[in-house]
Each structure stands twice: as structure tokens, then as C-alpha cells.
Amino acid sequence: MTNALMNNLLLADWFTDITRDMDHDQRFVLLIVVIGCVTGIICVLAMFILHTINSMHRRRIEAEMKREMIDRGMSANDIATIIEASAPPEDGTQRWIASWGKRSKSA
């Protein structure tokens, strides 16, 4: 308990040492910049996490659709034709990931 309190006090001392020579206007600007940077980082992380969740959801739906087609007795060629005819991915990352699974026509 006392170690955690001491660490917090040391962090406060460190920040105070850095900002000691600044006047109030400079501290305010520094605070605004730090808040802006932290907000930007949080937004980027949130977008990355949401994009990952969305991709996982789409892949799960696609896998369920393929499983249903197999249960209906469709051939592998029919399933491949239907999957390839689906709408193309809308962003660059999804197009890049989708290109990994495509086979070259010349092979």
C-alpha cells in the first residue's frame, strides 16, 4: 500500500519537476496537447478493435454459409462459384486479405 502511494507521489514529483519552469499558459497548452494525443491513440485503438471484430463476424457468417451449402449437398465447384461471385471487399485491408485465399488461374 505504501509503495503504491510512494510511486504515485514520485510520478507527481516528476511531472512537477518538468513543469516547474512553465507558466500557467504553457501548462495549459501542454495539457491540451497531451489530451489530444491520448484521445487520438484511443480512437485509433478503438477503430482497430472494431474493424477486427467486424472482420471476425464476417468470416464467421461466411463459414456458416459454406457449412449450410455443404449440408444442402452442393459441390465444391458450386460453392466456389457462389463465393467468388459475392460482393468484393470494400476496403484495401479486406481486399489484401481476400487475395491470400485466391488461387492463380494459371496454376
Image (cartoon, grey):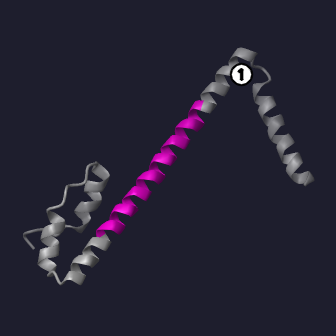
Crowding at mark 1 (Cα within 10 Å: few <14, some 14-19, many 20+): some
Q: In this view, does 67 lie above or below 38?
A: below
The residue wearing badge 1 is 27
Number of disc labels: 1
Q: Is residue 70 above or below residue 11?
A: below
Q: In this view, does 51 lie above or below 21?
A: below
Left or right: where 45 falls relative to 9: left
Q: Give the residue drawn at x 80%, y 30%.
A: 17
Q: Give the residue drawn at x 63%, y 31%.
A: 34
In the displayed orientation, state which residue is furthest to the left.
106
Left or right: where 59 falls relative to 3: left
- Which of the image's four quarters has the N terminus? bottom right
Give the structural element (helix, strand or loop) at label 1: helix
Residue 44: percent from left, percent from top: 48, 43
Left or right: where 64 falls relative to 43: left
The type of residue carrying mark 1 is Arg
Left or right: where 98 falls relative to 13: left
49 part of magenta stretch: yes
Q: What stretch is highlighted in magenta?
A: 36-62
Q: Give the residue drawn at x 89%, y 46%.
A: 6
Residue in front for this viewpoint, 76 or 28? 76
- Which of the image's four quarters has the C terminus? bottom left
Residue in front for this viewpoint, 104 or 71? 71
In the displayed orientation, state which residue is furthest to the right.
2
Main secondary-structure element of the magenta-colored stretch: helix
Q: In which quarter of the image is residue 53?
A: bottom left
35 part of magenta stretch: no
